Image: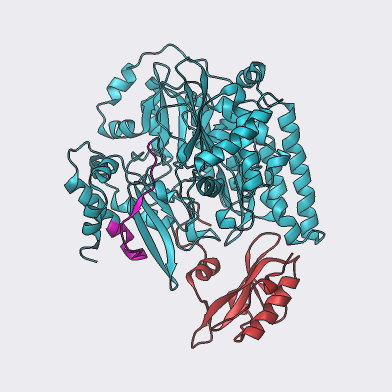
Amino acid sequence: MYAYDELDRTIINERVSEFRDQVKRRLSGELTEDEFKMLRLQNGVYLQLHAYMFRVAIPYGTLSSKQLRALAHVARRYDRGYGHFTTRQNIQFNWIKLAELPDALADLAEVGIHAMQTSGNNTRNVTSDQWAGVAPGEVEDPRIWSELLRQYTTLHPEFSFLPRKFKFAITASDHDRAAIKVHDIGLRLYKNEAGETGFEVLVGGGLGRTPFIGKTIKPFVHGHDLLSYVEAILRVYNQYGRRDNIYKARIKILVHELGIEKFAKEVEEEWLQMRDSALAIDDSVIEDIRSRFSYPAYEKLPHMPEELKKAAHDPHFEAWRKNSVAPHKVTGYSIVTLSLKPVGGPPGDATADQMDAIADLADKYSFGEIRVGHEQNLALPHVARRDLPVLWKALDRIGVATPNVNLVSDIIACPGLDYCSLANARSIPIAQELTRRFANHETANMIGRLHVNISGCINACGHHHVGHIGILGVEKNGEEFYQITIGGRADEKAEVGTLIGPAVPYGEVADVVEDIVEAYLALRARPDELFIDTVKRLGVEPFKERVYATR
Amino acid sequence: MTSPLEQKKIRITGPSMVTANRTWDGVVIYRTASQSWSADLSDAAIVRTSDEARALLTESIADDIGAIGAYIAPVEIKDSGKIKPGNLREHIRSEGVTIDLPVPA
């Protein structure tokens, strides 16, 4: 966990006071909505279909148990008893009252949580690998660099009014769990041949109306130069990014239109002017940040304790363990993913009671720490393997031990037309129906790893472009239709999926997905050939034929 | 700031109402014939011509303290006279989400 210093606490508390005054002036009529809108958006407050929506930042997806309890409190006291974890490691509350928002922010500020950088045309909440700091083989904890970027971008005056929103993601593992290739700037921390730690910098990735996979702009930037290089990118974007057309304002469009070589040249020229400026990072800065991260006092424990050997005879436990428990960098410990994808439930939602219970379990079994992943699940990052059986039972009792992590029913979905003012079609009921169709664990396990992503509009909050099966809701003559893509992926081999044919109506989506899965099972070369690999090998045609032969 | 009325020409093709969200709590509201707001769709003032729609929207937007994001939306008038939302979006705004909430209201 990172411990905020006095400056952080002051910034957060001052922001609460400012916003309290702004809300008061809005409600009295002193501020018009036109004047107030930007102020509320700078505090994560959107207007959705039924109410205001309040988006709270969870920097790099790391939460303490105390913070999770504060989120549960907000859900219970100011909302309707639940929250929705998002694909950017944030949480959203859907029913909050404007008049009560300053109190909610004040309650969150007490535990170091805020809503800055969750909206607006600025640098957004920095995301990272939810297994950061505990994944085996990781170069180093990427959250140290995420935190550096958080400090650097928070309230940065030059980057508070960019042409459009701007998102960073960082990973330090070979396997990318942070989807860095679909972010405005993606950073991959690695060691070069000389043994120096630095970043491969990718730029211009993004989804939405015009999806692009990020391009490598510089293969290696030393950690000392990270801020100056990132600032050079942001300056070039701030200067040349389009402000006349919202659909062409993201950096991905600028990179695409200029071409990566020309864009890189502009950045290089800018960078060389500032490389040795105050932005050159001294080792002491990094060490100071590193020293504010606390790590657990791990015990020396066996990899295969007696408790685990005994529990292995229980097929239900084993089914959960195989899907939800991942290796840890410390022998005797594991990373446990908590599925927020129960059969028939809305993906990513957690009730206040569940949040409180998870916080208690984190205290008992994970050194008080919880992680949020962009797949809309939670994780306990430091669980002793001897505790897995008893933890499993406790997680099962609160409904977060569905053994479907990374399987077909572990669906990523945006709130869709049930909540969102931008949506054209519903996402959640589609996801719910699919989880029912694939509720049989043995079948889902036999299908293997398969990511289904659903978005209710082209803004792509459900990352449908990079789902192995992507589902995009559109509106046709007042009816909900859905375009289906296959072959997308968000990891280190990121690709945008391919549309398989005409959109299908709401009532046929689950049937189509079942057809695609059945085609895969018939076409795969071996039982362990993953869906995504079968699509890569054969292309979309066989799947297209299967889906549209009878439609 | 350009007003929404100047930004685009208003044209309706059937019975319509003006809806918004209440400023202090965000609740869905409808403009009534008595120049106030109601959370009940059956209280909504119904307009049938583009000029009526423009006039209703103009007075709605003028209430910047009470309401936020006013816009014109279609409705369906049943034979019984009952007012129903004219599209799925308005149906969801009026009736609530189409799923069970994680915590029953």
Chain drawn cyan in the picture: A
Residue A550 % position (x, y) = 21, 65
> Which quarter of the figure is the C terminus of chain A placed in?
bottom left
Dividing the image into 4 quarters, which one contains the N terminus of chain A? Answer: top right
Number of disc labels: 0
First to last magenta residue range: A493-512
Residue found at the very far top of the displayed protein: A300
- Going 61% across and 25% down the picture, which residue do you hit? A225
Between residue A251 and residue A467, name the one nearer to us: A251
**In the image, A309: left or right of A94?**
left
- A496 with respect to B24 (left or right): left
Q: Which colour scheme is used?
A: by chain
Residue A150 pos. (x, y %): 63, 33
The red-tinted chain is B
User: Could you tell whether A83 is left or right of A537 in the image?
Assistant: right
Q: Can residue A89 be seen in this view?
A: no
Q: Residue furthest bottom?
A: B79
Residue lying at 70% horizontally and 56% vertically, measured from the top left: A37
Name the residue located 64 percent from the left edge and 54 percent from the top edge. Answer: A243
Residue furthest to the right: A30
Residue in front for this viewpoint, A33 or A266: A266
Residue at image point 33% right, 38% down:
A403
Observer-nearest of A63 and B56: B56
Task: Say whether residue A415 is magenta.
Answer: no
